[in-house]
Image (cartoon, rainbow, N blue to C red):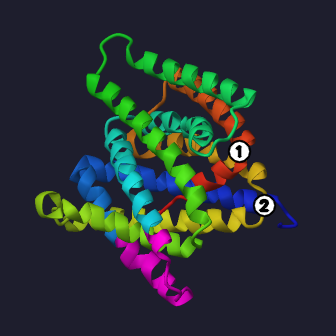
Amino acid sequence: MHQRPLIPFLVACAGIGSFSLMDALMKGLVLQIDVYNALFWRQLAAIAMLVLPYFVLRRRTRPTRAAIRMHAHRAAVVLPMGLAFFWALGRLPLAEAIALSFIAPVIALYLAALLLKETIGRSAIWASLLGLIGVGVIVSGRLRGVYDPGALWAAGAVLVSACLFAYNLILARRQAQMAGPMEIALFMGLFLAAYYGLAAPFLATPPAAEHWPAILGAAALSSLSLLLLSWAYARAEAQALIPVEYTGFLWAILFGWLFFAERPGLPVLAGAGLIVAGSFIAARAKPKLVQAVDLDAV
């Protein structure tokens, strides 16, 4: 572990900030070129720019068949997870979508009990209660006065994405026992690109020149976040870095205000506080899940 834990903490904060900035770029792309094209072209750019060259230079062993099946399985879960989240991101304020997504570690506690036969303790119950109340507070804010039904569908899509993300965390724990980080990064990226490519003849549209800086920037920020968080978690305990995950909400407020003139209302702030509190309890109970969250930036 690093002799100065403040340094890994700050590096992890930079990693979360990079990932949040990527979300902001993706939100803009979703509004301009639709969610499918934003994800498809970002995925191709990420492989071409960073993941594949780094993998070729650093690793030459061939993955096992079991590992390949796991990569394919997890990519099939990540695909609808990303589509649901980024579709919602185009219809919700950035901070609100991020706040709702924080429910994932709470859901993961119950999935771990169901799939891995782990026990559900009091911490899971308190975490789930706080998280559900927080979600209710945020959604209730959407139901006041004249509301947009599309925003409610978007909030539902974030919650569906969070459920898939929780299952993805369980798969990540199994996958880490079969392969190293670079193998996971490459093959997850390749399988995702292949899955997106199935719809390319019908949905893919080459982006205009003005969209490429955002696409390349989102791809680079995703990989940068992975590298920064990997470095930080290799030098500090997961429990010490748990609070870093929730700085994503602060980054989302900042980037939502800078790029989209978004200002979260009181229900979002109050609901986010409750969800973060529940997620923090869940992460304390299973800190390895938080590490899986942060290293899942493919």
Identity of the residue drawn at 59% across and 35% down:
110
Q: Which mark is residue 201?
A: none
Q: Amino acid at mark 1?
A: Lys
Question: Which residue is outermost to the top?
Answer: 145
Q: Which mark is residue 286?
A: 1
Identity of the residue drawn at 44% across and 21% down:
139
Q: Is residue 205 above or below residue 149?
A: below
Q: Is residue 128 left or right of residue 284?
A: left
Q: Is residue 32 left or right of residue 278?
A: left
Q: Amino acid at mark 2?
A: Ala
Residue 9, position as x, y percentages in the image: 74, 56
Q: Earlier in the sequence, mark 1 or mark 2?
A: 2
* Residue closer to the observer: 121 or 229: 121
Q: Is residue 295 visible?
A: no
* Residue closer to the observer: 227 or 217: 227
State yes or no: residue 62 in magenta. Answer: yes
Q: Is residue 77 left or right of residue 198?
A: right
The magenta stretch is: 45-68
Magenta stretch secondary structure, dominant: helix
Residue marked by disc 2 = 236
Q: Is residue 237 left or right of residue 79?
A: right
Identity of the residue drawn at 67% across and 58% down:
12
Q: Is residue 35 above or below residue 66?
A: above
Residue 197, position as x, y percentages in the image: 23, 65
Q: Is residue 43 visible?
A: yes
Check whether the beta carbons of the residues at disc 1 and disc 2 lie within 8 A of each other. Answer: no
Q: Is residue 44 above or below residue 153?
A: below
